[in-house]
């Protein structure tokens, strides 16, 4: 099969590119390298350096069909940044996705896989795991921009027959077990790479945002899913959208607190992690855990990395081997 991956130079997209290539598919990447890395794209994969906001250039790539499907990862994805620049998020995520979906319709593509997010569920705190029937109440322009694209895809199917899968990931983490790709954002805002860097002494004490949440240890709880498991979830879902569109909440279904993450990094690395309590980060729900049963039942997918330590270990190994990440810019 021949697939186009937008955002294939980024963290999750690059792991999906590897999984698609490993499965013998023909893959091309469209990315503007705004947060991704040229070095994350495997040799032999055709690369189009294109900004999805450039509708003409985007359409020129889609015109190079036939494609068996598009997997759309490209986005800005920082909740806090979106609270400062909401319109930028509607432009970069909303408009960019519209351009891409429009070209998919023009060129008669049949399958579209979309990176949605747990940030759809930013409403009142929920202690229980979140399934697909939960109300979509985004707590940020980032989450809202993803919710809007989910609705665009609903109508693109109803009116134009573009089948889609909205994959609502919770927290992606870890790195390719063979060390071919890993997480390298600048600035890094995600907890696991920050805790690892604190263990390595590469940054001052980790600030734990909020220690007074209504959780057992007072810190936030999240559902960490290994990025390779997410990649396999994409391979599974491609077979699922032959004749219908689907929406799935994707996670391990296990919640780990921020302090659990610190302890897991300490166990994996054998180093202590300096940390200090800090005020809550605006927009952070106390608990976000997926109920992924629908996806398990429909596709047979089951995560191979369930334990937090197993996830952390791959991230640690990648960071140790690549202290400067992909080495194409200075990571903050
Ligand atoms: N990382 C997570 O835990 C997480 C959780 C839920 C959802 N998501 C979603 O998954 C997707 C991938 O996330 P990630 O962590 O890999 O992010 P990332 O920043 O590492 O990757 C995004 C990629 O998209 C590219 N890109 C951004 N805007 C573009 C544009 N206008 N045109 C072309 N390319 C563009 C970037 O250069 C980068 O390579 C995003 O859509 C994100 O919202 C991520
Ligand atoms: O220095 C830090 C960084 C993070 N945290 C905490 O660690 C937890 C996880 O934070 P991340 O930034 O790693 O992840 P988020 O849960 O905020 O965000 C992830 O899930 C979101 C959905 O809720 C979005 O999809 C987003 O793209 C994705 O990275 C949060 O409680 C956060 O406050 C700290 O305490 N200190």
Image (cartoon, grey):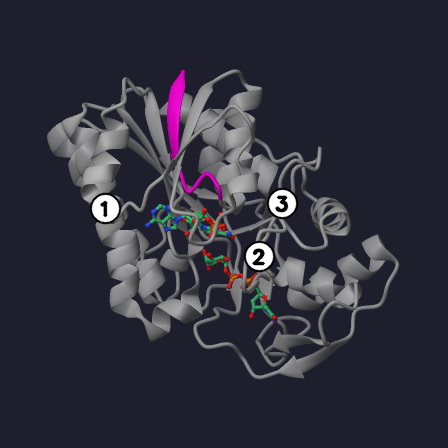
Q: Which mark is residue 329?
A: 2
Q: Is residue 30 left or right of residue 10?
A: left
Q: Marks 1/3: CA distance?
A: 28 Å
Q: Position of residue 265 (x, y in %)?
A: 77, 58
Which residue has dot 1 on it? 54
- Tag 3 near tag 2, CB within 8 Å: no
Give neighbour class at mark 3: few <14, some 14-19, many 20+ (Cα, 10 Å). Answer: many
34 vs 152, left or right, is right
Identified at 55% across, 36% down, the residue is 15
Which stretch did the figure color magenta?
1-9
- Kindly report which numbered mark, 3 or 2, lies closer to the viewer in this rendering: 2
Q: Which residue is denoted by mark 3 in the rendering? A: 182
Quarter of the image for residue 190 reads bottom right
Residue at position x 18%, y 25% in the image: 107
Q: Earlier in the sequence, mark 1 or mark 2?
A: 1
Q: Position of residue 272 (x, y in %)?
A: 84, 68
Q: Earlier in the sequence, mark 3 or mark 2?
A: 3
- Labels 1 and 3: the sequence-earlier one: 1
Q: CA distance from mark 1 to mark 2?
A: 25 Å
Ligand 2, seen in the image, is in the quarter at bottom right
Which residue lies at the image location 74% right of the left edge and 67% below the top edge? 202
User: Does any atom of ligand 1 lie closer than 8 Å to the CB of label 2?
Assistant: no
Q: Quadrant of the C terminus?
A: bottom right
Q: What's the CA distance linking mark 3 and mark 2?
A: 15 Å
Relative to 236, say whether 209 is above or below.
below
């Amino acid at each position: 099969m021949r697939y186009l991956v937008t955002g294939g130079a980024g963290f999750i997209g690059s792991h999906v590119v590897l999984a698609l290539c490993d499965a013998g598919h023909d893959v091309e990447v469209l990315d503007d390298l705004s947060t991704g890395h040229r070095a994350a794209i495997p040799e032999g994969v055709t690369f189009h350096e294109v900004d999805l906001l450039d509708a003409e250039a985007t359409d020129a790539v889609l015109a190079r069909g036939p494609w068996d499907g598009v997997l759309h990862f490209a986005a800005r994805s920082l909740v806090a940044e979106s609270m400062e620049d909401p319109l930028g998020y509607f432009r970069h995520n909303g408009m960019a996705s519209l351009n891409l979906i429009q070209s998919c319709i023009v060129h008669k593509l049949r399958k579209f896989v979309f990176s949605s997010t747990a940030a759809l569920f930013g409403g009142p705190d929920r202690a229980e795991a979140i399934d697909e029937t939960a109300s979509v109440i985004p707590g940020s322009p980032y989450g809202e921009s993803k919710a809007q694209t989910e609705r665009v895809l609903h109508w693109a199917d109803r009116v134009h027959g573009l089948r889609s899968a909205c994959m609502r990931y919770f927290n992606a983490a870890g790195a390719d077990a063979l060390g071919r790709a890993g997480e390298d954002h600048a600035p890094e805002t995600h907890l696991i790479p920050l805790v690892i860097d604190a263990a390595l002494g590469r940054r001052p004490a980790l600030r734990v945002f909020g220690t007074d949440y209504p959780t057992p240890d007072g810190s936030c709880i999240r559902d960490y899913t290994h990025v390779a498991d997410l990649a396999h979830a994409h391979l599974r879902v491609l077979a699922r959208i032959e004749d219908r569109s689907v929406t799935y909440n994707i996670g391990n279904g296990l919640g780990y607190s921020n302090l659990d993450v610190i302890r897991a990094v300490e166990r994996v690395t054998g180093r202590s992690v300096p940390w200090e309590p800090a005020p809550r980060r605006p927009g952070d729900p106390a608990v976000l855990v997926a109920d992924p049963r629908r996806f398990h039942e429909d596709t047979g997918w089951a995560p191979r990395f369930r334990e937090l330590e197993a996830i952390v270990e791959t991230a640690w190994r990648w960071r140790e081997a690549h202290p400067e990440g992909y080495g194409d810019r200075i990571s903050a």
